[in-house]
Amino acid sequence: ALATADDRRGRDRVADGGDSGSFEMNPTQSPKWMDVTTKDGTRIPAIYEISEGAMRVCYAINGAPRPTEFKSTADSGRVLAVYKKTSP
């Protein structure tokens, strides 16, 4: 996936034709908030943290409330993802 961001808003473009959409980040919350909107208009609330070389995001799926911690268990309505920076 290729993501572009201008300040705290951006669009996600997927080279393989998969899902795409937009996102908005709110770093003033604790933990930091991110709202993802899919191309069909579905809003997915999430929290995120960025550290050196990685970004952790915990997404609320299927209408679950925004997560308050970076934790996902079976049937929790949350998905925890870790994105790592790669060298070109």
Image (tube, rainbow, N blue to C red):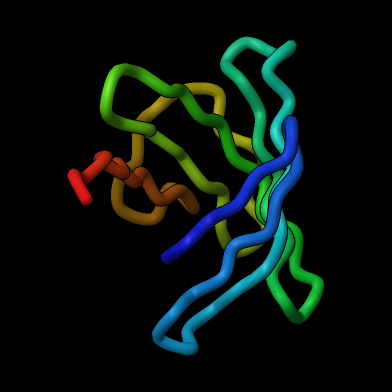
Of residues 47 and 6, the one nearer the viewer is 6
For image coordinates 60% across by 52% down, the residue present is 4
Residue 18 position in % (x across, y down): 47, 84
Q: Is residue 38 above or below residue 49?
A: below
The extreme bottom residue here reads: 17
**Which of the pair 65/3 is nearer the observer?**
3
Taking the spot 68% from the left edge, 18% from the top edge, the residue there is: 27
Is 13 positioned to the left or the right of 52 in the image? right
In the rendered picture of this protein, how many numbered marks are placed on residues?
Answer: 0
At x 46%, y 48%, the residue is: 78
Q: Is residue 3 left or right of residue 72?
A: right
Residue 54 location in percent, x, y? 30, 31
Residue situated furthest right in the rendering = 41
In the rendering, at what x and y percent does residue 43 appear? Answer: 75, 59
Please name whichever residue, 69 or 49, is drawn nearer the observer in this view of the structure.
49
Q: Residue at coordinates 48% horizontally, 89% vertically from top-left?
A: 17
